[in-house]
Image (tube, helix red, strand yellow):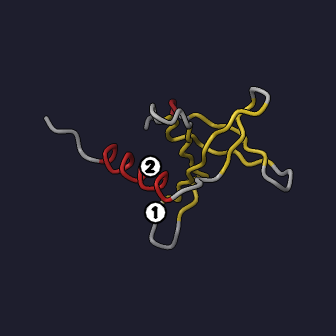
Amino acid sequence: FMEDDKKIISIILEDGSIDQVEVLLSFAFEDTKKEYIIYTKNEVDEAGNVTIYVSSVERVDEKPVLGSIATDEEWTRIKNLLRELSKPEEE
């Protein structure tokens, strides 16, 4: 990602506080029409890896509301998509 292309959004947490996060990817599965967002707070763990988060996106009164990933099937599909996206492009 180029620095200029960062998309920062505000997330209102359950306790009412607001987090600024960087959107890495948003997508929907065509068959289910469910939307998802992958984002980071740019936190680094002990191993030096940046933590990423995945949430479902639901529309409530036209406003996006983040939810949890409900099923193992959803997690598997999301992980498979991320694996595909992280593969080096073949020339």
Q: Which mark is residue 80?
A: none
Q: Nearer the viewer, residue 7 or 75?
A: 75
Helix or strand or loop: what does disc 2 sit on? helix
Question: In screen coordinates, is 67 left or right of 44?
Answer: right
The structure residue drawn at horizontal position 54% and vertical position 56%, both measured from the top left corner, is 71
Q: Quadrant of residue 60?
A: top right
- Return the x and y of residue 15 as percentages of the image width and height: 85, 56
- Crowd tier of the residue under label 2, counting other residues whose Cα lies within 10 Å: few below 14, some 14–19, many 20 or above: some
Going by the numbered disc 1, the residue's amino acid type is: Asn
Q: Earlier in the sequence, mark 2 or mark 1?
A: 1
Q: Nearer the viewer, residue 9 or 78?
A: 78
The residue beneath circle 1 is 49
Circles 2, 1 touching at the beta carbon (< 8 Å): no
The structure residue drawn at horizontal position 52% and vertical position 36%, both measured from the top left corner, is 26
Helix or strand or loop: what does disc 1 sit on? loop
- Return the x and y of residue 10 as percentages of the image width and height: 72, 40
Question: Where does the N terminus fall, quadrant-wise?
Answer: top left
The residue beneath circle 2 is 78
The structure residue drawn at horizontal position 70% and vertical position 45%, both measured from the top left corner, is 20
Farthest-out residue, bottom: 46
Farthest-out residue, top: 62
Q: Quadrant of residue 65?
A: top right
Does residue 50 sit above or below 21 in this rendering? Answer: below
Question: In screen coordinates, is 87 left or right of 31?
Answer: left
Does residue 46 sit above or below 1 in this rendering? Answer: below
Mark pair 2, 1: CA separation: 19 Å
The structure residue drawn at horizontal position 50% and vertical position 73%, both measured from the top left corner, is 46
- In this rendering, the label closer to the viewer, 2 or 1: 2
- Return the x and y of residue 70 as percentages of the image width and height: 59, 54
Does residue 35 sit above or below 52 in this rendering? Answer: above
Question: In screen coordinates, is 28 left or right of 16?
Answer: left
- Crowd tier of the residue under label 1, counting other residues whose Cα lies within 10 Å: few below 14, some 14–19, many 20 or above: few
